[in-house]
Image (cartoon, rainbow, N blue to C red):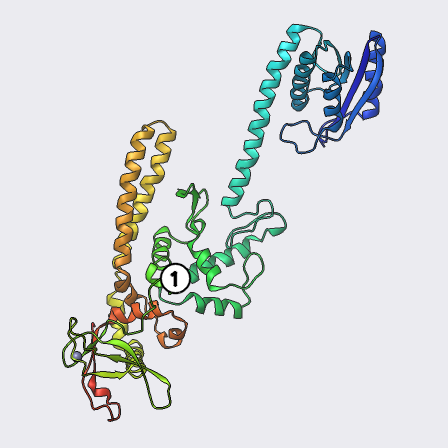
Amino acid sequence: MIRAAIYARISYDPDARAVGVDRQREDCLRLAASRGWTVVAEYIDNNVSASKYSRKARTQYLRLLDDIEAGRIDAVAIWMEDRLQRQVLELAEFLKVCDGAGVTRIASIGGEFDLSDSEQRTMLYIKAAMAEAEVEKLRRRVLRQRLQAAQNGEPHGGGRRGFGFPGAGKNGITAEQVEQERELIRDVAARVLSGQSLNGVATEWRQRRIRTPSGNFWSPQNLRQMLLSPSIAGYRTHHGNLIEGTWKPIIPREQWELLKALLEDPARSNGRRGHPAGYLLTGLVVCGVCGHRMVVDYNRRGGGRRVRSYKCKHRPAYGGCGRVSRNAETIENLIVEALFVAVESDDFDRLASNHTDDPAREICESLAHDQGLLDRLADKVAEELITAEFAKRKQAEIENRMEETRLRLAELGSARAITGIPRNLRDEWPNYGLDRKRAILGAVLNKVTVYSQGSLAPFDPDLIDPDWKV
Ligand SMILES: [Zn+2]
């Protein structure tokens, strides 16, 4: 007696004209009978993909393999769907197991192969290898599409839409909404560059009920992240490198470089480890008697309240006469008020317009130029115009240059601050972080000289002498 098994499977494929499992089963039974086999077991998998990337287990199929390997089966009648690459793949895999178990009696229906013919079996293996490559290609194409979608700020597998991007599916927004968001991005980029704080913008957006793609209100952190995202400058990142994207930049790349320099400026963050944040006028206040820098000092008044002052400290190695000290808050208020008044004057308008030639512009253009060189470098390697080794050297060279350029841009910080001072500085001031405030003061002030006055005398503003740069 030849113990035969029948195997049938229907995979889920909306396009396939899959024959019902019942018909497959009947066909197999008839095939076995015509060969004089006795069917001892049936293995039916319904609605399961055979692709090797499919996560669903083909339990019946695996049981069949077990039984073949255990020597319980002498022959197999299988039903094979036509023209389905995955079927070919599976069949070849199946034949290998059968060969290994010494099962040579295999019959198939509906397929292109007579599996008892060794030449046809060889053909099947070749086809299977090709089908495998095809499945792999398909898988890569799907991955690439997902990547592309991510680069377009589109949702991918439950991901979020990027602000200013159309998105897709239920996350998608209309072209009109996209344009509105892009307008907002351009507006906030210009405002942050002109000195407005992220905090201020976030507050305003909250009032205007503008939300992030995930439906939340904007926080300064969200805004920062959005503005630093390469996608708004038409870039995508690949292994940490910037690569030109396929979409149009929302803001000019030079402007994005400026934003990056501004927002990533290490001096901007207050949380410098091991460094106190410092005080508004640290480094700018000097003693009117000996010319030394004054430092912040705390002393207690009668009631025990700690009072902060700028003080010329007498230290043997350091110099310093130790004769001048003044309430810090009073000096700071005086200087800041003078700054507000200056900014609101017509003179300042003239001055700021003289500065419209932002020295940073040239630097940013150079950065954009180098970035372009980097982009083309990758293209040239792809087109085999240059060797990968040469490209690597060239890349290092360009990246070094860009690093230096970025440093120059960072050094320009204070020079840039002056063009970035908004007319309504008085309103914006409370929103600014200490570092931004210090950058602005550093841009307009050389120093503030504090002259000696009797400690019991009332504060005399004339004994505070600011030396303005402009
Ligand atoms: Zn002194």
Mark 1 closeness class: few <14, some 14–19, many ≥20 residues within 10 Å:
some
In this picture, residue 284 sits left or right of residue 254:
left
User: Measured from the top left, where is residue 137 in percent x and y?
Assistant: 55, 28
Query: Disc 1, ligand 1: is the CB inside 8 Å?
Result: no
- Give residue 108's quadrant in the image: top right
User: Measured from the top left, where is residue 20 in percent x and y?
Assistant: 81, 26
In this picture, residue 453 sits left or right of residue 338:
left
Asked whether the viewer can see residue 60, the reply is: yes
Looking at the rendered structure, the secondary structure element under dot 1 is helix
Instruction: Count every numbered label the image shows and give the total.
Output: 1
Q: Is residue 124 above or below residue 394?
A: above
Asked whether the viewer can see residue 81, the reply is: no
User: Measured from the top left, where is residue 79 in percent x and y?
Assistant: 76, 18
Q: Which quarter of the rendered picture does the C terminus lie within?
A: bottom left
Nearer to us in this view, 466 or 149: 466
Q: Which residue is drawn at the image coordinates 36% and 57% (left, top)?
A: 264
Q: Which residue is drawn at the image coordinates 43% and 62% (left, top)?
A: 188
In this picture, residue 389 sits left or right of residue 224:
left
Q: Quadrant of ligand 1?
A: bottom left
Q: Is residue 447 above or below residue 86?
A: below
Q: Is residue 147 above or below residue 163?
A: above
Residue that sits furthest to the bottom in the current view = 457
Nearer to us in this view, 121 or 316: 316
Which amino acid is tagged 1? Ala
Q: What residue did someone put label 1 on?
A: 190
Q: Is residue 147 above or below residue 216?
A: above
Q: Which residue is drawn at the image coordinates 63% and 27% (left, top)?
A: 52
User: Measured from the top left, where is residue 205 in percent x and y?
Assistant: 50, 67
